[in-house]
Every structure is written in C-alpha cells, then in structure tokens.
Image: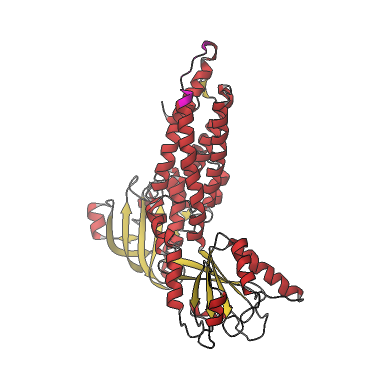
C-alpha cells in the first residue's frame, strides 16, 4: 500500500478524497501531453565565446543525424554522459564545429533523453541551429519547463526545484550554500520525516472511523499528542528561521538615518563605490529613500539612504521623514549618523526613540565628519549608551574598516545558516504557518477528546500544508506560478 492509499482509505474502490485523486490524474495527463521535444538557448542572449542549446524529450537524439556529422558518434552511436565533437550542417551548409553531450532517459536533468549543443556564441550560429531543431519537430521551451519536467519525472521535489532558481540568483556565498543544501534535499528530507509521522497517525485515525461501531482505538492519544507537540516545536523553528532567510535572500536591510547634512548619502556612495545618491549641503536634498546593494564578507546588504530627520513644514519632506522611520522599523541594521560639526540638540531623545521603535535592529551610532571637529562633547553625551559608537569620516573612509568589521560581527548568525535548515521562500513560510495552525487545532482536539472524524480533518490540513512545500500536494496554478518565474532554458 503506498502513502496516499494509507492516508486516504478507499471507499468502494476509490480514494475517499476525490480531489486528491483528480489532482494526480490531471498531473499524469499533463505529463503525458507534455512529452514532446523542447529546445532553448541556456546561455545568455548576445555575442559570446560559447553558447549552449539544450534539447530534451523522448527520442530527442533522433533529431541529430541529418545535421551532426561525427565519426565517433556514427561508429559507436550516442552513449550517455559522453561528449562528441563534429560538424553541424544544414542542407549542405556548414554552420559550425560543435560539441554535443548526450544523456540517456533517466540519466539527465529532466529525466528524459536529452542533449546539449555547445557552439560558438554567434547570434547567427545560434539562430540557425535553433531553426533546424524547430523544423525537425522540437518546440521552444516555456520558462522553467526543463525544471518542471525534472519535477514531474520525479528527479526532484518542488522545494528542490525552487532551490534551482535560488542557486541561479544567489548573489553571495551564504545564499549559494543555503540554496545548494536545499537543492541536495536537506529541507525536503526534514519535511518528509514530518509527514511520515503525521501519515502514520492520520491513517490510524482514518482506520478507526471504519471500525467506529466497535469503539476501538488504533492510535494512542498520548503518543499522538507527544508527536504533535514535538512537530509543532520543529515547525515553529522553521517559521522563525524565515526572518533570517528572507534577509539572506533579499539582502540584509541596512537603513542609514540621521539629521540633514549628517553625511548619509556620502556614506551610501562610499560603501557602493559610486555616486548613487545626490550629495548636497542643502538640507532636505534627499526626500525619498534610495536603495542599492553591496556585498561584504560573503553577504549582501541592502543599503537604504533616507531623508534627513528634522522638524519641517515642507509637506513632501515630511513624507520622506515618515518613510525614514518606517524603514527603521523594518531594518535589520541601522547606521545613525551624527554630524560631528553640528550635533542635534535632542540627540539623546532621537536615539531613545529609535531604540524603542526599532528594537529588532542592530543600532550603530556613527559620529561622522570626525576629522573636522572634536568629538569629545558628543562622546560624553553618549556615555552610558548600550550601542556601539564609531568615529568615522565617510568622505575619506576613515573608520569605515572598524564599522564594517562590527557590521559583519553583528550579522554573524548568517555564518551558521548554510549548515542548518533555513526557510528562504515566502511560499514555504506561508505553508508552514498554516501547518502550525492545523497542529494547534489537532492538539486541542486530542485534549478535548474531539471525535475522530474532526481530528482526522485537522491532521489532513497539517499534511496538506507540508505536502504543498515539496509538491506532494499541489495545483496546476501553483506549478505554473512557480516555474513561470524561471528563465527560459532552465
């Protein structure tokens, strides 16, 4: 008996959950109807040294003989995981010397028979090769279709498929390591263990329903309760990890705040190494947030330059200042710049307000322009502050090494992310939240001795939430939404 048969006992020869059956039937039919041959350019468009054209589908290798001339391939035939050098010709016209790598069915990325053509990166050469493939019956692949076929053919689950996109888009070492771990099945294996425990108890509860008149108990309520509590703790830990995972994926939000002319835009430009924000001695120049990212220590930081904080009657500037505080409330790190030549009179109150409104953020107090004025008085005013204080000169880069070292230390939690399971996908986090809610309801149902049919419904909801992560339970709309975000050729 397979998993879905255990979970959904048969009634009159059909699964009790007909939606579940219909879903897998539609997936099967979809796979049957999409077994044609697809092709796409897998390297970027434009002129380059090399280009790779990818082809996949049943008997796709049969396309090659009219175009590819290789003595070795003609003599021995195409063998999986071997590369063949030869000429690619169309109607007697020699197009290019190419290298073709062949993969047998079941041994390729998609799980289908496939091959890759490595040619010179001339747009003309690529266009002619693509034309020949299309004329031979192949069609252009949809965005993400190669990875979708890998998922449909059981080469990877849905979480691993999404990790492919994360790996392609990784902009730093930590995110690369996290995506690679997920691609290898680290996250999926944890979800699989969670589901196995739930499936066991859910099937026992379902079995009890078939023997309701005998009043028997196949699932120990004490063991079930212990399992639910343990699972809730593990799921909650994964949900909590999304806060860090999201920061890793999108960049650690680093807001730069301070009074007008404190040097916020100068610090942004210096860290980026380019003039990204307008620098002016006129107060109120920056009226909206300016964002950009920079990599440091293997991490990506999303720098956010904000409007100068001050009392003003200018309506537009007021909106900018409000946005500055909103960014602070969402930031992981805050650089609060203090102008050494003109510190705010209400400096202590502003810092106290930031500590209260943004308790989640690491707050660094940066006395800027420290090369132009004595900082003794400001340091006295900040005496007793629990925050780290730095004397810097954003324009000359003085003190920035110490500030960046402290920034790296403050985000040291990221160094452990690659070796741990961490949620970086909003869809996964949402599914886990719904799973946690269903677990809470299941725990309450067991404590209150709720009838088995209602308890079984809560357990199904928890299973559905976990199943959506790996694709054990999914919809065509969900799959289309996920894979449409992939680039063509992947």
Residue for point 72% across, 72% down: 318
Percent position of residue 434, x then y: 57, 41
Residue for point 62% across, 61% down: 357
Question: Would residue 135 be found to the left or right of residue 354 on screen?
Answer: left
The answer to whether one can see residue 154 in this image is no
Question: Would residue 69 be found to the left or right of residue 48 on screen?
Answer: left
Of the 4 image quadrants, the one containing the N terminus is: top left
In the image, which residues are magenta?
A: 214-222
Residue for point 45% across, 59% down: 40
Of the 4 image quadrants, the one containing the C terminus is: bottom left
The structure's colour scheme is secondary structure
Percent position of residue 262, x then y: 59, 80
Looking at the image, which is closer to me, 453 or 61?
453
Answer whether residue 200 is magenta in the image: no
Looking at the image, which is closer to me, 85 or 203?
203
Dominant secondary structure (helix, strand or loop) of the stretch shown in magenta: loop
């Amino acid at each position: 008996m397979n998993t879905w048969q255990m979970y959904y006992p048969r009634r009159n020869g059909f699964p009790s959950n007909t939606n579940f059956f219909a879903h897998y039937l539609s997936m099967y039919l979809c796979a049957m109807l999409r077994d044609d041959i697809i092709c796409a350019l897998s390297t970027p468009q434009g002129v380059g040294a090399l280009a790779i054209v990818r082809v996949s589908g049943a008997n796709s290798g049969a396309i090659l003989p009219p175009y590819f001339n290789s003595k070795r391939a003609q003599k021995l035939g195409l063998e999986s995981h071997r590369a063949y050098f030869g000429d690619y010709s169309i109607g007697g016209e020699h197009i290019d010397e190419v290298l073709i790598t062949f993969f047998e069915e079941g041994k390729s990325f998609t799980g289908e028979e496939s091959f890759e053509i490595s040619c010179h990166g001339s747009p003309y050469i690529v266009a002619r090769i693509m034309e020949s493939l299309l004329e031979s019956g192949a069609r252009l692949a949809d965005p993400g279709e190669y990875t979708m076929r890998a998922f449909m053919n059981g080469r990877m689950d849905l979480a691993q498929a999404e990790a492919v996109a994360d790996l392609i888009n990784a902009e730093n070492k930590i995110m690369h390591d996290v995506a690679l771990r997920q691609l290898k099945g680290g996250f999926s294996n944890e979800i699989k263990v969670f589901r196995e425990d739930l499936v066991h108890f859910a099937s026992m509860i379902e079995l009890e329903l078939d023997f309701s008149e005998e009043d028997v108990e196949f699932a120990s309520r004490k063991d079930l309760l212990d399992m639910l509590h343990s699972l809730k703790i593990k799921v909650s830990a994964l949900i909590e990890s999304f806060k860090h995972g999201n920061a890793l994926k999108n960049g650690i939000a680093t807001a730069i705040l301070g009074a007008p002319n404190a040097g916020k835009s100068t610090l942004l430009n210096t860290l980026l190494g380019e003039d990204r924000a307008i620098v002016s001695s006129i107060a109120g120049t920056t009226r909206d947030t300016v964002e950009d990212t920079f990599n440091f220590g293997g991490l990506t930081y999303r720098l956010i330059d904000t409007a100068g904080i001050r009392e003003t009657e200018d309506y537009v500037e007021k909106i900018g200042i409000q946005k500055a505080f909103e960014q602070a409330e969402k930031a992981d790190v805050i650089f609060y710049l203090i102008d050494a030549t003109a510190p705010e009179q209400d400096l202590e109150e502003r810092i106290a307000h930031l500590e209260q409104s943004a308790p989640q953020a690491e707050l660094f107090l940066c006395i800027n322009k420290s090369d132009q004025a004595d900082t003794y008085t400001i340091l006295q005013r900040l005496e007793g502050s629990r925050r780290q204080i730095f004397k810097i000169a954003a324009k000359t880069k003085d003190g920035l090494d110490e500030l960046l070292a402290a920034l790296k230390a403050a985000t040291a939690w990221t160094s452990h992310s690659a070796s741990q399971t961490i949620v970086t996908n909003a869809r996964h986090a949402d599914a886990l939240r719904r799973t946690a809610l269903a677990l809470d309801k299941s725990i309450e149902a067991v404590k209150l001795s709720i009838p088995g049919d209602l308890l079984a419904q809560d357990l199904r909801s928890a299973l559905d939430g976990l199943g959506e992560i790996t694709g054990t339970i999914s919809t065509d709309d969900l799959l289309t939404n996920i894979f449409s975000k992939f680039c063509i050729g992947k």
